Image (cartoon, helix red, strand yellow):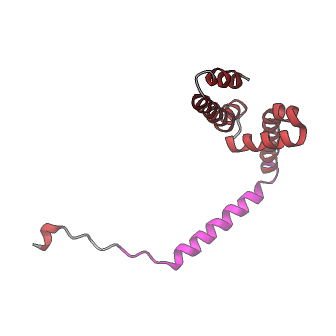
Amino acid sequence: LSGVVCVLLALTKGWVLAVIVLAYFVVVHVIEGDVVGPRIVGKAVGLHPAISIVALIAGTELFGIWGALLAAPLAGVLQAFVKALWAEWREMHPQEFQKAKEQIAAKVEEHVADKPVEPEPQARLLSDSE
């Protein structure tokens, strides 16, 4: 709404100035809405900015203005729930993670054993060749 007032006031000085003012408001609005806003909301709620943007778009598309308002807090609650569920599952099934560690270690050892390490040749200095 403030952009409309500024553009109308700029029209009194000419249409070129009005277009410049309109372009300024569009650029500032896009930067604020798509870059700064998700970063601030993400830090406040503890979300990655990309997840914040996806949550905002999904919330808006599914539930309109109420979805847009509640998207970041609900995404934060969902993230906390998934993290807690994951931590509890890891505590209940530690053998699964131990198996994965052993399998990865075996593959790394196998890969490293196939390729012997040769010492690198010594670099010659210019003073040595003279």
Q: Give the range drawn in magenta.
A: 91-119
Where residue 100 sits in the image (x, y, percent)? 71, 62
Task: Give the main secondary structure of the magenta stretch.
Answer: helix
Which quadrant would residue 9 be assigned to in this image? top right
Residue 120 appears in the rendering:
yes
Is 29 on the left or on the right of 65, as rendered? left
Residue found farthest to the right: 63
The quadrant in which the C terminus is found is: bottom left
Considering only vertical position in the picture, is 36 above or below 110? Answer: above
Where residue 118 sits in the image (x, y, percent)? 39, 76
Where residue 25 sits in the image (x, y, percent)? 64, 30
Considering only vertical position in the picture, is 30 above or below 10? Answer: below
Residue 36 appears in the rendering:
no
- The residue closer to the viewer here, 42 or 63, is 63
Q: Is residue 105 magenta?
A: yes
Q: Residue at x 58, y 69 (%)?
A: 108
Considering only vertical position in the picture, is 120 above or below 50? Answer: below
Which quadrant would residue 122 be assigned to in this image? bottom left
- The residue closer to the viewer here, 55 or 32, is 32
Residue found farthest to the left: 130
- The residue closer to the viewer here, 4 or 106, is 4
The quadrant in which the N terminus is found is: top right
Q: Does the magenta stretch include residue 37?
A: no
**Marker count (numbered):** 0
Q: Which residue is drawn at 89% across and 42% down?
A: 62
Q: Residue at x 76, y 44 (%)?
A: 54
Q: Residue at x 68, y 38 (%)?
A: 34
